[in-house]
Amino acid sequence: MTADLTIPKMIPNLISNSISDRFDLKVGVNGDRLNRRIEQLAKIGKQPSGCIKRLAFTSDDIQARYLVQQWMSEAGMTLRTDAAGNLIGSYAGTEADLPAFATGSHIDTVPSGGKYDGVLGVLAGIEVVQTLHEQNRRLKHPLEVIVFTDEESTMIGSQAMAGTALLNEPERYQPSPGDSIQDCLERIGGDWNALATARRDRTQIGAFIELHVEQGAVLETTGNQIGVVQGVVGIRRLLITITGKANHAGTTPMTLRQDALVAAAQVVLAVRNTARRMESQPVSTVGYLTVSPNSVNSIAEEVQLTVDMRDLSKDVLEEMTDRLQQDLHFIALDTDTAIETAPLLTVEPTPAAKPIQRTIASVCQQLNLSHCSLPSRAGHDSLEIGRVTNMGMIFVPSQAGISHSETEYTSPEDCVNGANVLLHTLLKLDGMQNS
Ligand SMILES: [Zn+2]
């Protein structure tokens, strides 16, 4: 009898927990609706070639925003636009005073973009909220879906929200020639002069999770359905100027040459080797090069080239820069040229929060989705938002690793998998953070 009295007290808790766990895992987004909306949004800005051109602040961008606003309202969200033109849909939580959980991405594209870059993260976020709304369910935390302004060009939306925007230098943000950022923001309901008010911090946003297509081929080649992003890599970009001496290609003996292009060839290899020598597998690229006088019978006098180095670790980026500088010194001596470097761009890496990475991985396990960890080597709104709050990113495969093209493709199943991982990650974090 004693046992009978004790066990019933214990069992209800155990049962209700396991039932609610099982129930939760069965909850999934409406995949048909998600994929239908991806197709619908892809019609706005569609070019005869098949690519999508929906540049931020254009009439196509504004039309797409209207459509997304309708879907947000339908999903039970209240809407607002901040001073940076970020469109924010809010779905209230059940407990007062908790910071919001936020998700989202962008709906602007590059001049010849595809259907999924950015769009998937926004529409999956709306789908998550609509799924909760239809089940009459709320998280403890308020839930926000954010459409960031102009991710593809100025990143003004996420920078303003992270407080990293250069408020006194509007000229640094020029979405297109002849267009001022002030006018552009006004067009979408923002206000440059009030940009500081768009800033948020971790007391307002407790966690930000972005679902995005990988835009690379790691998931496809390793056969994984979901990528747990370790962070968004930082960038060191340099301009290297090599100065030699122009001379006749026929009459100048090999021993007397100061050939800037021969030096450049060595620099290109040094840049590649700098990355290859590091254990963490950073990447390093020379993608731009000009030769002067660039003439068939002249020895090159000047070569300018760019170096783009990316890694998750600031220390690795700094070590690569130092090693490259040493190599440049010896190349200059060897080729009798002068080599100068100037910084072009410095972006610090943003690591994803470890507890969020672990939660995404455990959700994948529960949903039986194969997954692996990987860095994001492309920039995202998460890069900025991760500077002010706990950030996590979920990747789904990009066919052949192609993106920023009309051939960008992620299968409908992968889109739905990503949205379900997003849903369950948010549910799990909601339970963890307040239990
Ligand atoms: Zn994107």
Image (cartoon, rainbow, N blue to C red):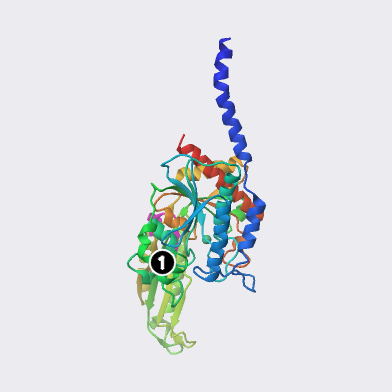
Residue 81 x %, y %: 46, 59
The reply to whether residue 213 is in sight is no
Q: Nearer the viewer, residue 171 or 216?
A: 171
Q: Is residue 220 left or right of residue 84?
A: right
Image-quadrant location for residue 191 = bottom left
Image quadrant occupied by the N terminus: top right
Q: Give above or below for 89 relative to 42.
A: above
Give the residues in magenta. 309-317
The kind of residue tagged 1 is Arg
Residue 314 magenta-drawn? yes
Q: Give above or below for 252 relative to 323.
A: below
Q: Residue at x 47, y 87 (%)?
A: 295
Image-quadrant location for residue 50 = bottom right
Residue annotated with mark 1: 237
Residue 36 x %, y %: 66, 57
Residue 7 x %, y %: 57, 17
